Image: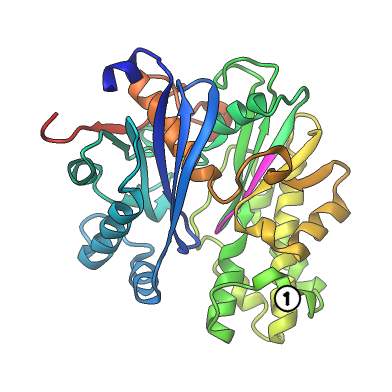
């Protein structure tokens, strides 16, 4: 079956994603030849238990060589559980990002793809970001090549933008009229700024809750304009794409709302995340026909209303176009796994700033194979 992948046949690939929001593991099947999307299959979500989430949270910011035994065990056990029982030719395993410093120490996704291949009995592609970083890229975002395929899959006839509101926000502008994602003019992508991570951190610190369900707390508050202006003075927003962020790159956001009530703090952090997206939209080569939103932030009506109020284009969850916003990133890594197996590029200068289009990722096969 792996030969079929390398020969460019249509296969079912299983992608896995555990994002910086630390909510759990997404697993989803996608049918693809690494270029076109032919369909989507079964999916599964395995939420992290509170104690697992605490272990992973304590490991954030750590690098290889640090004591990561407990965190590594959580990553592997939860992924084996989430990924077992699917019928797939190949698995794309992102791992858990603990640290991301492309201009310095590199990027660190915890997890052993070789061990996972042995446990599942299926070839696994993993360590997707390191090759990009070694060639001078940001190593993120990596979903844009998949977003370009999605734009073609939904039949878009004009440029569209995909906005992922996870722990960090990232934006992809895609022109489906350009056939290959690595070709000039096909893509532009970058991290817009913090998204759900600071809101989640605030909710946990002040309310003992993992997130602001339905934006209820933010809706009850008032945005502190002074804090919002200070946030937008950050040098990151003046940098031209491509650019990327670590989950905690804007950790001082919490300090900016430290004196506010819970509701006002939630409203202000939500406004900051939306404002970061608006600044990012200014970099699009041309205005997109619509902004398609994925990730947990699309469930926050306050965040979505802020975007709709400020943008001229249609703002809609990806479900409006028949896609699954809960599983889009997992599907992306299934898609990228097939590209890696075929030797096709997974990032390029327009998406990560890498010097040349590169196929990132390591392919591990089960011992019996």
Could you tell me which secondary element the residue under label 1 belongs to? helix
Residue at image location 79% in from the left, 80% down from the top: 220
Depicted 285 relative to depicted 199: above or below: above
Depicted 297 relative to depicted 106: above or below: below
Q: Quadrant of residue 73?
A: bottom left
Give the image location of residue 357, x and y in percent: 46, 22
Numbered disc total:
1
Residue at image location 20% in from the left, 39% down from the top: 121
Give the image location of residue 306, x and y in percent: 81, 59
Left-right relation of 249 to 304:
left
Q: Nearer the viewer, residue 231 or 262?
A: 262
Q: Is residue 50 visible?
A: yes
Residue at image location 66% in from the left, 16% down from the top: 178
Quadrant for the N terminus in the image = top left
Give the image location of residue 210, x and y in percent: 54, 74
364 falls in the magenta region: no
Residue at which label 1 appears:
216
Depicted 135 relative to depicted 169: above or below: above
Q: Nearer the viewer, residue 168 or 14?
A: 14
Tell me which colouring the rendered structure shows. Answer: rainbow
Quadrant for the C terminus in the image = top left
Q: Nearer the viewer, residue 44 or 135?
A: 44
166 falls in the magenta region: yes
Q: Quadrant of residue 76?
A: bottom left
Q: Which residues are magenta?
A: 162-167
**Looking at this rendering, what residue extends furthest in the top direction?**
7
Give the image location of residue 249, x and y in percent: 52, 60
Residue at image location 39% in from the left, 26% down from the top: 338
Q: Is residue 136 visible?
A: no
Q: Nearer the viewer, residue 160 or 78?
A: 78
Chief SS of the magenta region: strand
Left-right relation of 171 to 79:
right
């Amino acid at each position: 079956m792996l030969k079929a992948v390398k020969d460019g046949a249509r296969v079912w690939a299983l992608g896995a994603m555990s994002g910086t929001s630390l909510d759990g593991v997404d697993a989803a099947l996608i049918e693809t030849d690494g270029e076109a999307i032919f369909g989507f299959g079964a999916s599964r979500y395995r939420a992290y238990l509170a104690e697992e989430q605490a272990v992973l949270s304590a490991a954030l910011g750590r690098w290889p060589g640090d004591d990561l035994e407990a965190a590594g065990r959580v990553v592997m056990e939860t992924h084996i559980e989430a990924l077992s029982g699917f019928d797939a030719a190949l698995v794309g395993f992102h791992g858990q990002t603990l640290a991301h410093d492309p201009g310095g120490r590199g990027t660190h996704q915890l997890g052993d793809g070789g061990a996972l291949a042995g446990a599942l009995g299926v070839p696994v592609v993993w360590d997707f970001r390191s090759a990009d970083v070694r060639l001078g890229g940001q190593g993120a975002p990596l979903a844009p090549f998949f977003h370009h395929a999605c734009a073609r899959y939904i039949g878009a006839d004009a440029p569209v933008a995909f906005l992922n509101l996870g722990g960090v926000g990232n934006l992809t502008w895609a022109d489906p009229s350009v056939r290959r994602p690595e070709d000039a003019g096909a893509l532009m992508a970058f991290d817009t700024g913090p998204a759900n991570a600071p809101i989640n951190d605030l909710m946990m610190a002040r309310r003992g809750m993992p997130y602001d369900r339905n934006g209820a707390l933010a809706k009850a508050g008032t945005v502190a304009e002074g804090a919002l202006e200070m946030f937008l003075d950050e040098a990151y927003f003046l940098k031209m794409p491509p650019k990327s962020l670590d989950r905690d790159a804007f950790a001082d956001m919490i300090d900016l709302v430290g004196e506010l009530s819970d509701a006002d703090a939630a409203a202000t952090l939500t406004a900051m995340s939306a404002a970061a997206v608006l600044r990012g939209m200014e970099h699009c080569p041309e205005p997109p026909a619509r902004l398609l939103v994925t990730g947990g932030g699309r469930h926050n009506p306050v965040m979505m209303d802020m975007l709709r109020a400020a943008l001229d284009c249609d703002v809609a969850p990806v479900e409006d176009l028949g896609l699954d916003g809960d599983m889009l990133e997992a599907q992306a890594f299934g898609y990228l796994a097939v590209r890696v197996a075929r030797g096709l590029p997974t990032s390029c200068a327009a998406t990560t700033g890498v010097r040349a289009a590169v196929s990132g990722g390591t392919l591990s096969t089960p011992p019996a194979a």
